[in-house]
Image (spheres, helix red, strand yellow):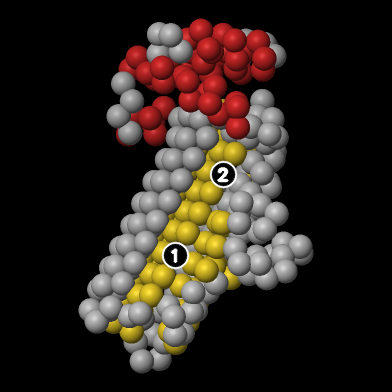
């Protein structure tokens, strides 16, 4: 179904069964598969391929040569009806690739709202990207990676399968991330190691001085006290009583499966 207010360039192909929302704009030489749903106000600039069982929300901007919802590169994939789900107000720049999930994983690759995916970003099968994240040019997520809200991934950075990147993290460019990065942390290098708290990012997002001091204290316990992770968890748990903001560290530890960068 194509809304009567949508624009479809005559050179584009929209397969029967696709759903195109109000005021959506499909520019020249795009291909939209039969199981695709594109929300109101979303713009495909030109030469964009959207395939598979893919749902794209409202007011997204998708630039030329992006490929969304294609078959993933997992050798076990045998054509199962897995999905891609993308939220609202994302900017998906040139040559970005977002692959559908796998039956062995969650079955869905998900991108939230208000993200900027710069040129040539790759989001592999079963990844979850939260809200208000920035993935710079050539950032590469292997399968099953999770990126929490407000994270920034520098250009040319590769993230290993099943890694979790916490909220408000800054990963520097040209890094290789092989373990989980706790929230609020700056990480850099190959393999990435911690370089302090993302103070600038926290200020920009409205964290107050007490909250930032509590986060610094938790960071010191985790990285400068020479305590084991289990010992650090106990001390950070005690901090939660004064500053609930550090509960984010404990919640993160419960999700971590690859161990954290140290």
Q: Is residue 91 above or below residue 261?
A: below
Q: Is residue 213 above or below residue 131?
A: above
Can you identify the residue that label 2 sits on?
A: 146
Q: Depth check: give the residue in front, 42 or 179.
A: 42
Seen as rendered, the residue at the extreme bottom is 10
> Marks 2 and 1, how far apart in space?
19 Å
Q: Depth check: give the residue in front, 225 or 254.
A: 254
Query: Which residue is found at the position 30% from the left and 63% from the top?
Result: 59
Residue 154 on image: x %, y % = 52, 47
Can you identify the residue that label 1 sits on?
A: 55
| Mark toward the start of the polypeptide (2 vs 1) | 1
Using residue 43 as the reference point, say whether residue 189 is left or right of it: right
Q: For residue 198, which quarter of the picture?
A: top left
Q: Nearer the viewer, mark 2 or mark 1?
A: 1
The dot on residue 208 is none
> How many marks overall?
2
Quarter holding the C terminus is top right
Query: Which residue is found at the position 42% from the left and 87% from the top?
Result: 12
Q: Depth check: give the residue in front, 214 or 88.
A: 88
Residue 36 on image: x %, y % = 46, 72
Residue 49 on image: x %, y % = 50, 76
Residue 174 visible, this angle: no
Q: Secondary structure at mark 1?
A: strand
Query: Which residue is found at the position 44% from the left and 65% from the top?
Result: 55
């Amino acid at each position: 179904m194509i809304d009567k207010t949508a624009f479809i360039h005559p050179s584009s192909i929209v397969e029967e069964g696709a759903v195109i929302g109000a005021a959506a704009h499909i520019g020249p030489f795009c291909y939209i598969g039969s199981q695709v749903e594109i929300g109101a106000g979303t713009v495909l600039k030109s030469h964009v391929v959207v395939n598979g069982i893919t749902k794209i929300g409202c007011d997204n901007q998708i630039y030329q040569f992006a490929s969304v919802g294609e078959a993933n590169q997992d050798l076990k994939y045998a054509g199962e009806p897995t999905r891609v789900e993308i939220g609202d107000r994302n900017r998906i720049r040139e040559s970005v690739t977002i692959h559908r999930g796998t039956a062995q994983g969650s079955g869905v690759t998900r991108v939230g709202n208000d993200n900027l995916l710069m040129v040539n970003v790759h989001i592999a099968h079963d990844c979850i990207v939260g809200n208000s994240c920035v993935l710079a040019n050539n950032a590469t997520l292997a399968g099953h990676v999770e990126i929490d809200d407000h994270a920034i991934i520098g250009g040319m950075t590769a993230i290993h399968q099943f890694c979790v990147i916490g909220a408000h993290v800054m990963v520097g460019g040209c890094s290789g991330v092989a373990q989980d990065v706790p929230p609020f942390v700056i990480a850099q290098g190959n393999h990435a190691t911690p370089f302090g708290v993302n103070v600038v990012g926290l200020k920009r997002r409205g964290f107050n001085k007490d909250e930032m001091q509590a986060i610094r204290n938790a960071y010191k316990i985790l990285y400068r006290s020479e305590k084991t992770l289990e010992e650090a968890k106990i001390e950070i748990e005690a901090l939660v009583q004064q500053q609930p903001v550090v509960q984010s560290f404990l919640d993160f530890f419960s999700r971590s499966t690859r161990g954290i960068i140290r």
